[in-house]
Amino acid sequence: MQTVPIIGYALNGVKFDPNTGGACSNNASSAATQGAGAQCTYLGGGAWSLEAIVPNSPFNFGADSNNAHVQPTGEYHYHGAPAGVYSAMGGSESNGLGNKMQIVGWAADGFPIYYKYGYKTADDASSGLVLLKGNYKPNSSATTMSTRPLASVFPLGTFRNDWAYSAANGGDLDECNGRTGVTPEFPKGIYYYVATESYPYLQRCIKGKLS
């Protein structure tokens, strides 16, 4: 398992970039990002890294319906599941379930990235599709850390530091938001990542080796 600057690219050539450059300083008490004494910034400079698309965050990164936005450099990129790519590949969603399991991109280590849905039983293509979920949950003990920004201003989950992985959290995926199983393109099985509705949305690490 390793972290890489760019985790992968969608089929349309747009990069997946789930992390942000935003952060807050230790013990921040205001979500203001500009002005004298600002304790948070969208461009880095703090110990508490901001998440882009978590619910109830006091920060608005301007993500669109595809969980994407434009960086200050002008580069469009995804922070979460690319709904537009899924629909462009013939995917549709109704009542919280998709009509197919679909590759939407490729990770930096060469393994495929699938959109939200996979087989209920990883190695059984006849088991039906389900919405796959990550195994990260907010760690409530983070709010008791002496250096964490004020919880009343920054709800639990605002920061990357708030989230913790456990295989016992009831999700379907490993710490890199992936699993091994059969897919329409790989009926004999393969390791693959999943772009999920739940945190971490996109993998924050890769399991394979970079060539």
Image (cartoon, rainbow, N blue to C red):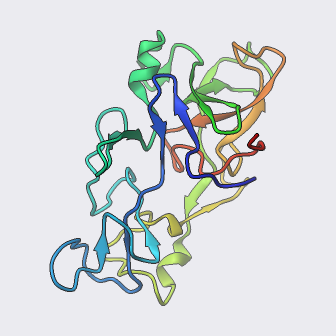
Q: Is residue 107 above or below residue 206?
A: above
Q: Quadrant of residue 139?
A: bottom right
Q: Quadrant of residue 155?
A: bottom left
Residue under the point 75% across and 26% down: 121
Residue 86 is left or right of residue 127, and the answer is left
Residue 172 in sight in this render: no
Q: How many marks?
A: 0
Identify the residue at image location x=79%, y=14%: 187
Q: At which x and y percent is residue 97? A: 49, 22
Q: Position of residue 192 (x, y in %)?
A: 70, 32
Tell me what residue is drawn at x 78 percent, y 33 percent: 180
Q: Is residue 168 above or below residue 84?
A: below
Between 44 and 92, the one lying in front of the other is 44
Classify residue 211 as left or right of residue 16.
right
In the picture, residue 56 is in which quadrant?
bottom left
Residue 165 visible in the snapshot: yes
Residue that protrudes farthest toward the top in the picture: 90
The residue closer to the viewer here, 9 or 116, is: 9
Residue 69 located left or right of residue 95: left
Check the image and name the residue furthest to the bottom: 146
**In the rendering, at what x and y percent does residue 26 appear?**
41, 84
Quarter of the image with the C terminus in it: top right
Image spot of residue 127 (x, y percent): 72, 18
Front-most of residues 93 and 188: 188
